[in-house]
Structures are given as C-alpha cells and as structure tokens.
Image: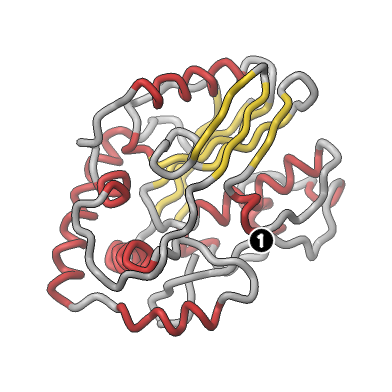
Amino acid sequence: MSKVILHNGRCGSTYLYLCMDRYYRAREGDDSLGDFMSIYERDYDLDKCKYVGLNEFLVPEVINSVYYNNTLMTSSPARTEARGKEERRGELHNVMYTTMVPDSYEKEIRRYIVKNTMQDHFVLLKYPLLTNPKTNFDADYISCERADVRAQTRSLYLAMTTGYYHIGPGEERKIQRLSKFEPGIEVLDRWTYDMEKSWEAYRAMKPKKCQTFFMEDFENLKPYQVLEMVGLNDWNKYLDKNFDVPIRKVWSTNYNMTI
C-alpha cells in the first residue's frame, strides 16, 4: 500500500521522505543518491515505472507540476535570496501556519492525479496536512511531528527569512553566516503562538489511524536506522549500510544545524 507522510513544517519530514524514497527507488533498481534538486525535480513515465515519489506535490506554492500523456514532471521554483526581513503573511507563511489557505482547482486536480496514480503504482507522498482539505487516500499514513514547538518556530522563521528551507552537502558554512537573521524574542513569541494554534488544527485533522514519529527521536539517526524505525527492515537487500541522502541539517536549536 502507498505511503503518505503528513507534517506541519520543520519536523524532519524531508529527511524521513528521502530515506524512504531511496529505499523504494532502490527496490525498483535505482540505487542512485540523486543531487539536491532531485528532492523536487522528478520525471515519471507512468506507463513504465512502478514507484512514484511526490515531495510536497499537493502544494502548488512550493512545487511546479506538469502532467501530460501519462508523464508526470515536478520541479521547484528557484530558491529565493536571503532577505533578513520578517514576512509575516506571505504565501509560504500561510501554507505552513493556517488552514485558511483556500482550496483551488489546481490542488483538486493534483489530488485526483495522486488518487488515480495510487491505483496501479506505489506512491510515496509528502505534504503539509493543513494545506489541503482532509483527504482519504488509499494509503498508510505517517505523521512527522516535533515536540519542541519553539525550536520548530525558530527553524521556520530562519528558513523563511533566508530562503533556505534545506541545504545540500557543502553549504553548511553559508548557513552559519545566515544565522545573523536570528529572530528577536518578541518575534519568536508571536510566531510560536501562531504555530501552537496550527498544531491544534493539525491534530484535529490528523487521521485516526496514523503512525507518529517525532523529529527529536530520529534527527540524529543514520538513514538505514530511519528505515528500520518505520519498519523497512529489509533495506540491506537493496542498499549499502552507508547510503546517504542529498540534504544536510539546517537551523538547529544549538545554533549548529537541524533538519
């Protein structure tokens, strides 16, 4: 059965998704690492493939998509430059924080594509739960959450004000320089209040039958350990123990890095 990873922003869901994505790709014969942009950029000929990985596919503000002649292509808008300025009500703020983002025809079409694709493909879908109406996919659900809401809020603030939601290998020093955009206490208090309200909405929408994993429990695990955590214990049939994923941690509470 297909898998759906739900999240509420800055909860390690991309790391979890990429670990699982490597497993499912390797199971179909593709054991490549992929580069940083492969997190977002995918090209699937649905007549030929059995597995489809869709990262944030239900969020048009984050992922561009073209579906034509049974081929599905996804890409991401270019990374924005560091602004160092609080954008309290920008599009991405709304995507992460609130259920008030209206539904759209584009989202409706994408949900239809996912449901249709799940009929004869194994799909790994990840998306922020609050960005779409409650949907019943024919899939197993995983909720990726974070116990430390203030740390989550700080991470989201820095990601939004710098434009760096994730980084690839070798970009760690750049993140250290951008940490100068650290939020003040009043700003962090205000954003944390919003985040706590969003968690209330999230838990009201969360499926009753759903595995839940907290970022604090897996952020320092190696990729193969993450697979074992979610029950994919036969990873060694397809991958070497030292397999990696193409992102690095960013914006941690200890001013080093978190996912």
Measuring 57% from the left and 15% from the top, which residue is drawn there? Answer: 116
Left or right of residue 85: residue 62: right
Horizontal and vertical percent for residue 103? 29, 26
Left or right of residue 174: residue 105: left
Q: Looking at the image, is 243 positioned above or below residue 8?
A: below
Relative to the observer, which residue lies in front, 109 or 199?
109
Q: Few, some or many C-alpha atoms within 10 Å of disc 1 (few <14, some 14-19, many ≥20)?
A: some
Relative to the observer, which residue lies in front, 157 or 5?
157
Horizontal and vertical percent for residue 155? 36, 67
Horizontal and vertical percent for residue 194? 18, 54
Horizontal and vertical percent for residue 49? 77, 27
Relative to the observer, which residue lies in front, 173 or 239?
173
Residue hosting label 1: 246
Secondary structure at badge 1 equals: loop
Type of amino acid under label 1:
Pro
Q: Looking at the image, is 2 positioned above or below residue 128?
A: above
Dividing the picture into quadrants, the one containing residue 29 is top right
Measuring 38% from the left and 70% from the top, which residue is drawn there? Answer: 82
Measuring 34% from the left and 83% from the top, which residue is drawn there? Answer: 180
Measuring 23% from the left and 55% from the top, which residue is drawn there? Answer: 195
Quarter in which the N terminus is drawn: top right
